Image (cartoon, grey):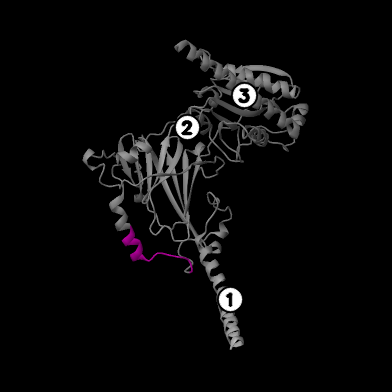
């Protein structure tokens, strides 16, 4: 009967609908386990309580010992002892190889974080499966030599790869560019925070006196990696795992990240070969080192310096300039770290922010320190950059002009800079009028605006110099 057929069809549709309703939550749960993000995944959280050491939760997708052993045995046959010419052409002469972990899913995400002032990079992998990476899964080719695993406490012996082996250990997988490294310099992971005290009663303008020459390391590293640290975490809330590989390098590089089916490849590139314009901006002092301070101890120089740098950052973020910041948080740094960063990246300009102090409360105004050893340079030198900084900052803030001060002999970051350097002493914290100006948001913004104008003016001069050189060459 027609009515019976209609009832049977309606019943069938009802059963099908109920099945769909029951199935949808299950599918959503499966999708949740994949843990996908837009772009790159978020940074590791700062709250340690949300992290669990690997192995504490059995609900996540852990690998059995046998699975892990079998997978690594298979991968070992594809590890680069040399590198195929196809890959080498893409990567250049210096690069790092990280073997992909066992059972890595298609939803796995990676992030490369540059901690330039510490000469470190952090390579982070996140996935819904347990991630196991060991030191011997990290390889590198550096200056024609091959290295594997943790570097020794002494310079490890380099292994020169025979030509007849270069094609054997890596399959010619087509490379895809995964991402360029994300820049980040505001890490607090450095253990090396020894610094010298500031000269808090300077009559010549510097609040950061030069330390004795920091002793160079007795160990000469021929490996590009100086240390390797691997940490793994489980996140039960979103059913994900993260492994963070921290590599301390021999110098600061720019980085390009590639991957194929078996490995991640980190190309170590000279920053000048990637970026047209590079500057280093330094907020003086920081962390345990407060610098000078107001007479009532309410205001500290380290905070003033950082505030001015952060205001400058807002302006520079709009420009096509690669900016390395020595710090964007309240952290300690050595003087050597600051100037080494500028020298490592071959910065066009190196600008350091400071505040001044004097035992005489009446002393006030703005001055800029420079490296007079650069005076015979034919291109822009420290004095010419310092002149621009003094002029542009004074145009904005209108304080007394205390002029340029040559300080290569007793201000470490000025004297050791191999690039045009200017150390701006914005005003005196020992003078109440100057202090009121520095403590105001408007005052910090004006100092930053003056420095910003000086940087743009400096690049105009550099462009004119480049044009002049090209004309002479013709």
Report, in whole angstroms, how far the alpha carbon at label 1 lies from the one at label 2. Answer: 57 Å
Q: Earlier in the sequence, mark 3 or mark 1?
A: 1
Task: Choose between 405 and 445: the one closer to the eye.
Answer: 445
Task: Choose between 306 and 219: the one closer to the eye.
Answer: 306
Q: Residue at x 75, y 32 (%)?
A: 442
For mark 3, give the secondary structure: helix
Against 420, residue 30 (above or below) is below
Q: Earlier in the sequence, mark 3 or mark 2?
A: 2
- Is 170 left or right of 385, judged from the image as shown? left
- The residue identified by callout 3 is 456
Residue extending farthest front: 1
Task: Choose between 37 and 66: the one closer to the eye.
Answer: 37
Q: Is residue 429 visible?
A: no
Q: Earlier in the sequence, mark 1 or mark 2?
A: 1
- Magenta stretch: includes residue 88: no
Q: Quadrant of the C terminus?
A: top left
Q: Residue at x 49, y 67 (%)?
A: 57
Task: Choose between 458 and 410: the one closer to the eye.
Answer: 458
Rate crowding at label 2 as few (under 14), some (14 to 19) or many (20 or more) other CA atoms within 10 Å: few
Against 25, residue 416 (above or below) is above
Instruction: Kindly check if marks 3 and 2 are in contact, taking CB atoms under 8 A apart as contact.
Output: no
Q: Which residues are magenta?
A: 59-71
Report, in whole angstroms, how far the alpha carbon at label 3 lies from the one at label 2. Answer: 20 Å
Q: Quadrant of residue 197?
A: top right
- The residue identified by callout 2 is 274
Report, in whole angstroms, how far the alpha carbon at label 3 lies from the one at label 1. Answer: 66 Å
Q: Residue at x 64, y 25 (%)?
A: 424
- The residue identified by callout 1 is 17
Q: Quadrant of residue 101?
A: bottom left
């Amino acid at each position: 009967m027609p009515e019976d057929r209609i009832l049977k069809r309606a019943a069938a549709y009802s059963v099908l609908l109920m099945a769909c309703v029951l199935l949808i939550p299950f599918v959503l749960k499966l999708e949740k386990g994949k843990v996908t993000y837009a772009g790159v995944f978020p940074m590791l959280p700062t709250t340690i309580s949300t992290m669990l050491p690997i192995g504490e939760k059995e609900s996540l997708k852990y690998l059995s010992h046998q699975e892990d052993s079998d997978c690594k045995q298979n991968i070992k046959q594809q590890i680069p002892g040399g590198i195929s010419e196809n890959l080498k052409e893409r990567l250049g002469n210096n690069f790092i190889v990280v073997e992909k972990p066992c059972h890595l899913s298609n939803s796995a995400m990676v992030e490369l974080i540059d901690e330039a002032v510490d000469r470190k990079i952090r390579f982070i992998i996140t996935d819904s499966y347990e991630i196991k990476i060991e030191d011997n899964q990290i390889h590198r080719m550096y200056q024609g030599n091959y290295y594997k695993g943790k570097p020794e406490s002494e310079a490890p012996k380099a292994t020169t790869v025979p030509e007849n082996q270069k094609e054997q250990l890596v399959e010619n997988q087509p490379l895809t560019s995964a991402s360029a490294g994300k820049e980040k310099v505001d890490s607090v992971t450095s253990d090396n925070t020894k610094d010298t005290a500031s000269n808090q009663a300077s009559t010549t303008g510097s609040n950061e006196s030069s330390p004795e020459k920091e002793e160079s390391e007795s160990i000469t590293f021929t490996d590009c990696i100086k240390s390797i640290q691997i940490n793994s975490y489980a996140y039960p809330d979103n059913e994900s795992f993260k492994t963070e590989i921290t590599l301390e390098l021999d110098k600061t590089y720019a980085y390009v990240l590639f991957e194929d089916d078996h490995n991640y490849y980190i190309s170590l590139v000279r920053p000048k070969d990637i970026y047209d314009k590079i500057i280093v901006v330094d907020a003086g002092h920081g962390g345990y080192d407060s610098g000078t301070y107001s007479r009532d101890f309410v205001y500290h120089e380290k905070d003033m310096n950082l505030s001015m740098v952060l205001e400058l950052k807002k302006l520079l973020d709009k420009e096509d300039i690669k900016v390395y910041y020595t710090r964007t948080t309240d952290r300690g740094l050595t003087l050597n770290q600051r100037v080494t960063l500028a020298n490592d990246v071959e910065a066009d300009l190196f600008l350091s922010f400071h505040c001044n102090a004097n035992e005489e409360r009446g002393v006030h105004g703005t001055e800029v320190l420079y490296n007079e050893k650069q005076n015979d340079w034919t291109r822009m030198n420290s004095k010419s950059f310092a002149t621009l900084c003094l002029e542009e900052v004074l145009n904005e803030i209108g304080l007394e002009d205390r002029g340029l001060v040559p300080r290569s002999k007793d201000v470490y970051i000025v004297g050791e800079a191999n690039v045009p350097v200017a150390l701006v002493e914005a005003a005196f914290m020992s003078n109440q009028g100057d202090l009121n100006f520095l403590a105001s948001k408007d005052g910090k913004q004006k100092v930053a605006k003056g420095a910003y104008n000086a940087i743009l003016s400096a690049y105009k001069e550099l462009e004119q110099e480049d044009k002049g050189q090209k004309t002479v060459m013709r």
